[in-house]
Amino acid sequence: MALVAVPGLGIAGVFAAQGFWPIFPFAGLELSALGAALWVSLRRNRYREVLRFEGGQLVVECGDLGGEVRRVLAWPRTWTRVALERGRRGNDPQRLLLMYAGRRVEIGRCLTDDERAALRGRIKELLRPVVPEGAAGAVGRGPGPSTQDMCSGE
Amino acid sequence: MAHHDHAHDDHAHDEHHGPEKGIMRWIKTTNHKDLGTLYLFFAFTMFFIGGLMSLVIRAELFHPGLQFVDPEFFNQMTTMHALVMIFGGVMPAWVGLANWMVPMMIGCSDLALPRINNWGFWILPFAFAMLLGTLFMEGGAPAGGWTMYPPLVLQTGNAFPFLIFAVHLMGVSSITGAINVAVTILNMRAPGMSLLKMPLFVWTWLITAYLLIAVMPVLAGAVTMLLTDKYFLTSFFTASGGGDPVMFQHIFWFFGHPEVYILILPAFGIVSTIIPTFARKALFGYDSMVYAVASIAFLSFIVWAHHMFTVGMPLAGELFFMFATMLIAVPTGVKVFNWVATMWKGSMTFESPMLFALAFVFLFTIGGFSGLMLAITPVDFQYHDTYFVVAHFHYVLVPGAVFAILAGVYYWIPKWTGRMYSEKWGKIHFWLSAIFINITFFPQHFAGLAGMQRRVPDYAVQFVDWNVWSTIGAFGFFLAQFIFIFNMLACCYGWFGRKQGLPDRVWEGAHGLEWTVPSPAPYHTFEVPPVISDNEVTAAHDSVDALDKHKLS
Ligand code: HEM
Ligand SMILES: [Cu+2]
């Protein structure tokens, strides 16, 4: 960013000093657009949703790496259901939903349809009342996307 | 360029979500492949319109005297031809190729900002509708030259504000494209795709984007000052109000010279991709290619006044800009050397993309040499504003930039559409293009050396032979391009039973991630980042070989 901003504003500054100031606002506008674009893209790269299966509970948290963590829900594990729905219109991506007591929360928005289907399978396994040995607790170690960096590598 | 195959794709994996149907697909699309296709169709439409304008110019210049158009309209044609070709043809073609290829080359699923991408494209039809609309206005289209020098340009009629606004819109479109490509390359490379493993097309585009971001505000500011000078009583460039018209030239060329490199750097990238494929050897001197492009980009900021040797500068200025300009020949020479060295002892074959790439190396170099001649200040005093300059920039732009675009389309169209073009017609197209382009522009060197001025519809009878050749060549070149258009459309739409069922790696010597996905490339590629551990990427680079050898010894 400095690599562009310094020459960009420098050039504009030199011309402005000569009295040709209208270059300056354009340079400013453009560099802000570039900054915003980089910021948005870097932030998208850092966004994570984490599912944890803690004892009897399913906890979902989301947030940016290194940023504040927001707890989305903490629901009883056995009562929670997971489902895959079609998008609202023809070509919209599918929606992966967690449901409990009439509430619905969408997760995994930045995955592809294939990945969402795989994730649904894994969550289903982990929501089952009888949990296979070893899969409880910290699930991240198991195979498949369970404790998920769902949006990394976007 | 690939309607049908997408429909295909839908059937293949039912739940994989494909494009929307009908026209709304193209209006709303945020898919990098769709937008790449749109950009390319737009660019070739503009090449066609700009080509028609050039034929008006060449028809008028077939003989001395005034035959077909009046001088005012002639000047509108030269001005509009340049604007349409540069901002409507070459620039969008590069953005289109970047749209298609950059994500596939670095292994990510789309550009970083897909909606901005859509917006950046759809600005263009409006900008050019507005620009072309000025042809029908009171006072006609802009006629003061694409360089828009005041005070002449301030005499433009009603078209003037539309010209300025159109230039702003083209600028916005270029900027959104540049920001998008740069952010994508910086943030979205697949794991393992380090900067010095990136294909050269990606590298050259990154540096192009950098140049665009650096200089577009300068153009925007310059044309805004023209606007305020005309309508709001400022006097940035009007001498009567204490302004300085020569400063416009400085500002314009501070943008303009980097801009001409913006037009050529991606071509370097394409040629550096194609030659290794058909020479079946790794590119010679990958690292030096990257550094050469970077130094050309740097130098392009400090040579602008070579366009202004004759306006009067202090001697020190004339000398500085002369030497700085000549310096550019050094990194350019490195690149030409590397291309030739890549072919040295290679097992070469001469398919259409390779033919165009080879013609590029040869003919672009001719343009580089005439550039060197123009860079010599005292010599430029004679050549400036003659047909010698016209010959120079057409050699670097047509057999340079445009041939590279054609080469790129030939090279990747099997990947885009899943159908092979006709090699026979490709070769016919190549030879006709190569011959006619030289018939068009080589004589212009001689006309210019003998003193024929540019941007004038009439000329002294002594130049008539050169001009007759030029005009014949121009019409021939224009007509030959339809072979290409039909050949490519046949791939898009499956006419003439084009060969299908191509392997992923369409060219046996090709390397790079784009050749690891099916042909045609599915609507979505690399949604899961590929792992760059194999020799796919590195196979195209000699530097990695060299490293390994080091380790062994
Ligand atoms: C070795 C590299 C090059 C050198 C030394 C060089 C030098 C020059 C010089 C000195 C002029 C001004 C001539 C005059 O107006 O009297 C000129 C004009 C021009 N050059 Fe180059 N050039 C080089 C490469 C390129 C490239 C790569 C492009 C574009 C792809 C290009 C495009 C142009 C254009 C469009 C003009 C004319 C602008 C106008 O007046 O309308 N040049 N060049
Ligand atoms: Cu220049």
Image (cartoon, coloured by chain):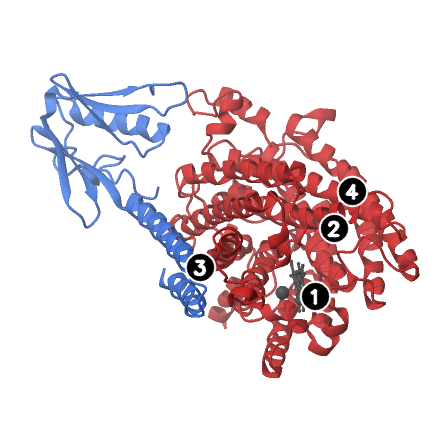
Compared to A54, does B148 lie above or below?
below
What's the chain of the residue with tag 1?
A: B
Which residue bears the numbered disc 1? B368
Q: Nearer the viewer, mark 2 or mark 3?
A: 3
Residue occupying image coordinates x 55% and y 59%: B541
Chain A tint in image:
blue
Which residue bears the numbered disc 3? A23
Q: Separation of disc 1 and disc 4 at Cα?
A: 24 Å
* Residue A67 falls left or right of residue B395: left
Along the viewing direction, whichever of B475 and B104 lies nearer the viewer: B475
Which residue bears the numbered disc 4? B478
What's the chain of the residue with tag 2?
A: B
The residue at label 1 has a CB less than 8 Å from ligand 1 = yes
Q: Nearer the viewer, mark 1 or mark 2?
A: 1
What's the chain of the residue with tag 4?
A: B
Residue B54 location in percent, x, y?
A: 75, 46
The residue at label 4 has a CB less than 8 Å from ligand 1 = no
Pointers 2 and 3 in contact (CB under 8 A)?
Answer: no
- Residue A38 shows up from this direction: yes
* Circle 3 crowding by C-alpha within 10 Å: few under 14, some 14–19, many from 20: many
Q: Are marks 3 and 1 on the same chain?
A: no
Compared to B525, does B295 lie above or below?
below
Specify the label residue B355 is tagged with.
2
